[in-house]
Image: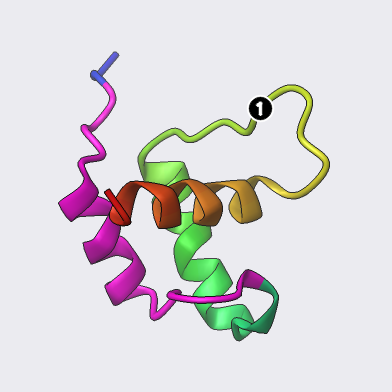
Amino acid sequence: MTNRKSLTPETAGEILDRCRAHGDFHALPSANVEALLDYADEYRYRKPKTANGSRVRYFHAMLQRRAAK
């Protein structure tokens, strides 16, 4: 089994740039959400157990927080 990829603030910003996913998650076109979901799969992202939303929405929020650092 491979190790998880490191998700640095720079990497988070690059993913948001590639997916054109800066800003409000709910305003994103479905193609951008699909691209984010592909990255969530690649980075083996799992949403918190107490989450009240989709895995991709939580991944987007995490990327936004990381990129802001």
Q: Relative to the observer, which residue lies in front, 29 or 62? A: 62
Q: Where is residue 64 in the image (x, y as percent from the top left)?
A: 43, 57
**According to the image, what is the colour scheme of the structure?**
rainbow
Residue at 46 percent across and 44 percent down: it is 41
Quickly name the residue at label 1: 48
- Locate residue 6, reporting x and y percent: 21, 32
Amino acid type, label 1: Pro
View extreme (front): residue = 69
Residue found farthest to the top = 1
Taking the image as shown, residue 10 lies to the left or right of residue 58, namely: left
* Residue extent of the magenta highlight: 4-25
- Give the residue furthest to the right: 52
The mark tally for this picture is: 1
Q: Which of 45 and 12 is in front in this view?
A: 12
Residue 4 image offset from top left, x and y in percent:
28, 25
Q: Residue at x 24, y 18 (%)?
A: 3
The residue that appears at 29% across and 13% down in the rendered structure is 1
Q: In which quarter of the image is residue 68?
A: bottom left
Helix, strand or loop at mark 1:
loop
Decide which of 1, 8 is in the foreground and name it.
Answer: 8
Is residue 10 in the magenta section? yes
The one of 9 and 5 positioned closer to us in this rendering: 9
Characterize the local packing of mark 1: few (<14), some (14-19) or many (20 or more) Cα atoms within 10 angstroms.
few
x and y, in percent, of residue 58 in the image = 61, 47
Name the residue: 43% across, 75% down.
22
Q: In this view, does 51 lie above or below 66?
A: above
